[in-house]
Image (spheres, coloured by chain):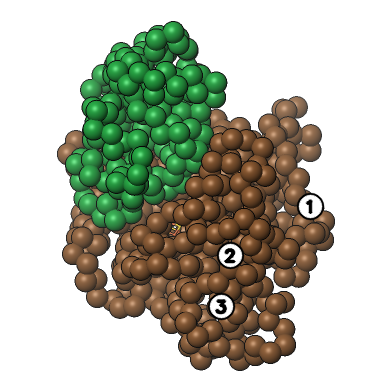
Amino acid sequence: MSAPRTIIDKVWDDHVVRSGDASDLLYIDLHLVHEVTSPQAFDGIEHQGRAVRRPDLTLAVEDHNVPTDSLLIRDAMSKAQVQQLRANCERHGIEHLAHGDGRQGVVHVVAPELGLVQPGMTVVCGDSHTSTHGALGALAFGVGTSDVEHVLATQTLSLARPRTMAVEFTGALPPDVSPKDLVMALIAQIGANGAHGHVLEYRGPVIRQISMEGRMSICNMTVEAGARAGLVAPDEITEDYLAGRPAAPTGAQWDDAVAAWRELRTDEGARFDRTVVVDTSELTPFVTWGTNPGQAAPLGDGVVPDPDSFSEPGEQAAARRALAYMGLEPGTRMRDIPIDTVFLGSCTNGRIEDLRAAAAVLDGRKVAPGVRMIVVPGSMQVRAQAEREGLDEVFTAAGAQWRLAGCSMCLGMNNDRLGGPARVASTSNRNYERRQGDHARTHLVSPSTAAATAVAGHLASPRDLIGGDR
Amino acid sequence: MTPPPLTVHTGRAVVLARDDVDTDQITPAQFCKRLTKHGYEDALFAGWRGQPGFPLDQPHLRDASVLVAGNNFGTGSSREHAVWALRDWGFVAVIAISFGDIFRRNALKNGLLAISLPEADVAALSKAAETDPDLPVTVDLEECEVRAGELRRRFDVDSHARYLLLNGLDDIALTEQQDEDISRYERGRKPWLPSLRPGCLSGRGAS
Ligand code: SF4
């Protein structure tokens, strides 16, 4: 009998083309490409006279720098990058979803929605949030441009086997706590580098109740704990999500695939290098106060911490620098922090359930005077679905802007980069200095916290709104 | 493109004593709109340069080629532009307590040595370099050793990356030699795995 293995090892073993002493050559089932991290990789293969080995396992999407208020790309450099991607795809026969296509959007929203990510696959992209796809039981991780070039040319990567970590969410799940809050609580618990070098498997009863979209939010932010990837073993929720999607198997192949997916779980008795348990019973929505995603506090009774309260000198210095950048005083209650900009969107929280959660809070209410809110659906299909449900009308009636799909204010590479001083409640994943603008201060929040904050004008959860504001 | 072989390097060090320096700080997104792989020295720490006391602004350390950093250096975005900016500024090595995984991999692919040392060694090295800015710091990839003044420390490095760097080899060319294995693997792939032959997505999912 073979030794019990984790799901992470099973997916790994399934993809070893050739094993070496320190690293294995791993086959990549799906390579996602976008305009920002690929031009130099295409240049590289062309310079060496190489071809794209498997254009049929490659999908390109325009997402990072495209405007979401217009189909016209006015910025010359963005336009050049997009045109370069189009030309590269054309030349190499790669399927490509252009700005304006009904299926375009943030690559990590688009690929699962098309059924391109399935349990047991390996997925890479020149983007760290590729970890999102772990929600479907895939081993999915971000790579740099040199690795993009390597995958274009060979469909493989040489990689050392990662360490494994089990993350068990246990306990009851309070009704106002979203998947985003769970992962933010995890990161706050273990730190922004707490999962360094590991691939995580999310386990336990709580993750089983969470929808595929919620699992994507959790796997998405796994990288913010320093992990390379995180995944969830497939179950019925996974199968229901995939059934009928354009690239999902059909007929007898569907049955074969499902039979294989059902085998894909961690064996009884398999060992993880580390195990972390997060009790969810007492959680409230989480928000960040600092400049990395680990610098977070509960919104319920949380306050901006005193840098001296940290044990490590490095943490103290980081907190001091973060508070200076964020313009916050220790002891300030999180819910007293005023907000002037709200961004709902990104590969973390730009899916239909996220928009529904925010719309449920905004319905019949108004964005507070002086607050600007933009809603950027994760994909054009999400946008169309939201419009079928009338969510766009809820957003616009509340005074928010309703946009086309893209990364937008998540990283401010398009015209949504904030020019002046701003304090943003953002459903994205990174509260780094200057990410959303040179003078932008970012607080990461969940979709319903974002909506409640927009109404209240300060960090707030929907519970804080009851009475008065509607 | 393959970086030239790298064996031993000696240069001066500049200390950036901060944890969790993310790649958005190393190369802000505005600089990632370029189509090239070179010429990113203007991007390096663009948001931090000019701030009072920023270590890289010290004119006498402009030619430093070893960056000494803290915990989790290069965390965040996978952008290789961060490595290109450090390299184009003139850095040959970054010595830190730990690195973001993707950053470390990108660095080694471009001939920028990303070396982890225990916290106490990084602290000692930082102190020595700050006390004597002319202190020669040597990173030796053959011996896997850092040497600076009294300090002599071995480091671990991914052995595949080390082999490529010492010999100036192209990783893609090496992998191409395993073409038969790759083809054999491809023949055994599960028949239901998705494929993106042109037009394949124009089915039910299109709106
Ligand atoms: S939405 Fe933000 S985090 Fe996600 S891929 Fe785009 S820029 Fe990256």
- Report, in whole angstroms, how far the alpha carbon at label 2 lies from the one at label 3: 14 Å
From the viewer's perspective, tell me whether residue A95 is left or right of residue A285: left
Instruction: Inspect this view and state whether residue A351 appears.
Output: no
Secondary element type, mark 1:
strand
**Mark 2 or 3, closer to the camera:** 3
Q: Point out the frontmost of discs 3 and 1.
A: 3
Read off the chain for label 1: A
Among the chains pictured, the one given brown colouring is A
For the N terminus of chain B, the quadrant is top left
Letter of the chain that mark 2 sits on in the rendering = A
Side of B160 relative to A266 (left or right): left
Chain letter for the green part: B
Subunit of label 3:
A
Q: CA distance from mark 1 to mark 2?
A: 20 Å
The image shows residue A119, relative to residue B162, as above or below, that is: below
The location of residue A100, given as percent across then percent down, is 32, 74
Q: Could you say whether the residue bearing mark 2 is in a helix, strand or loop?
A: loop
- Mark 2 highlights which residue? A445
Which residue lies under the disc numbered 3? A457
- Residue A466's mark? none
Q: Earlier in the sequence, mark 3 or mark 1?
A: 1
Does residue B151 appear anywhere in the picture? yes
Query: Dot 2, how many residues are within 10 Å of its Cα: few (below 14), some (14-19), or many (20+)?
Result: many
